[in-house]
Amino acid sequence: MRRAVPLMIAGCLSVGGFANLAHGADLMAVYRDAIAYDAQFASARAALDAGREKLPQGRAGLLPTVGLSASTTWNETESTARVSGATATTRDYNSNGWTVQLTQPLFRWQNWVSYTQSELAVVQAEAQFGLARQELIVRAAQAYFDVLLAQDTLATAQAQKVAIAEQLESAKRNFEVGTATITDTHEAQARYDLTSAQEIAALNDLNVKRQVLRTVIGKEPEGLKNLRPGVQLAGPQPDDINKWVEMAESASASVQIYQALYEIATREIEKQRAGHYPTLDLVATNGRSGAGNGNFGGVDSKASTIGLQLSLPIFAGGAVVSRDREAVALKEKAASDLDNARRTAALNARQAYLGVSSGLAQVKAYEAALTSSQSALDSNKLGYEVGVRINIDVLNAQSQLFDTRQKLAKARLDTLAALLKLKAAAGSLGEDDVAAVNALLQ
């Protein structure tokens, strides 16, 4: 009888809680579904496609432009000689023509700077997309872990309810035979009712967490694979917080984004100052024009030209100088944004590293506490059977065991989430890390 409750607890947790998860989806499958469905990631993918178009747009300023212009005009003129008795002469005719012009920039410094800015804009778009991918991994994994934890919470509440129900029946039997007071029955009944309420709350929380996961992957999987029993979690490599901070300050996706923005702002100053520089273009034209009608004859002409066109700005009302000052101020803003991005990345790396370290320590502590709680429950049940422990002692020991089991599961999942966030902070989170976590699932 003494071992009936622990065995029943294990049976409920393994069979009632997770039997339907044996062939369920794993983290890698959830991640791939998220790539195909998640709206935020789809938006980031479209933004990347748009950002890559900055390069051909910038290159266009260095390439020749060709334009065609054409016109046709109906003319009606009336002329009168300045002599006595002269009559008016009327002439109606059509004039038309077309011109093709090619312009090749030879020296336009602002166009060259715009081209270098377009290269940096593509770098920024790539970094933004990399950040979106890392955020997707973290969001998908967190939603996955939340469902696992909610399932474990529900299974724990159900197993605890079964164990308390058995203790309640035992208390009733002992009261009937006169070996226990009615207090034992009331205490067990109160615990049973409380656990029933906790089961309802756990079921509701599980439904909510499943809906959150559904918004990420577009469907509700039949089941999710849980961590292997007794899985051992590895610490971060390298095991040095300062190295992770250094990586975050240089390789974080957010830092790369603001680094590109800073470089763009730096070149913007040069671009605006180029408004004072002369421009030199090669211009070539080819055209035809014609005028006249059948009565008065007509004239057709063709012309081709090629030459250099120099333009020297002298005064633009102070606009160029003002834009220069604006660009300088925006560069200072970009520098401050870059500093803030580095500090934020370093803070995120420190927090995630401490979360992993603390989580690993908590896992070890809860594993030891789980063993102690199981021993305490066995001892209290034996003491209750021989009369040296009361029913409330057994109920407290059961609650402690289930609470410890729940906290251990949460510590393991929180540690894995912190490890993914640490790699994201350092800019190294990728599909290989998803596969590594996926290998820990049963």
Image (spheres, rainbow, N blue to C red):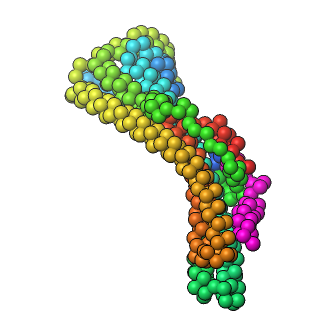
The stretch of residues the image draws in magenta is 1-30
- Tell me the quadrant of the picture where the N terminus can be found: bottom right
Q: Is 178 placed left or right of 318 in the picture?
A: right
Q: Is 239 placed left or right of 309 in the picture?
A: right
| Residue beneath the point at 37% across and 23% down | 267
* In the image, residue 153 above or below residue 391: above
Residue 396 in percent (x, y) is at 57, 70
| Residue beneath the point at 73% across and 49% down | 442
* In the image, residue 187 above or below residue 268: below
Residue 51 in percent (x, y) is at 51, 34
Q: Is 122 placed left or right of 163 in the picture?
A: left
**Residue 85 seen in the current view:** no
Residue 61 in percent (x, y) is at 45, 22
| Residue beneath the point at 51% across and 42% down | 357
Q: Is 407 placed left or right of 320 in the picture?
A: right
Q: Nearer the viewer, residue 206 or 196?
A: 196
Q: How many marks?
A: 0
| Residue beneath the point at 43% across and 25% down | 117
**Residue 114 seen in the current view:** yes
Q: Nearer the viewer, residue 131 or 442?
A: 442
Outermost residue, top direction?
307
Q: Is residue 164 magenta?
A: no
Q: Nearer the viewer, residue 17 or 35?
A: 17
User: What's the magenta bit mostly, secondary-structure-wise?
Assistant: helix
Q: Nearer the viewer, residue 252 or 258?
A: 252
Q: Residue 73 occupies which quadrant of the picture?
A: top left
Outermost residue, right direction?
23
* In the image, residue 408 above or below residue 318: below
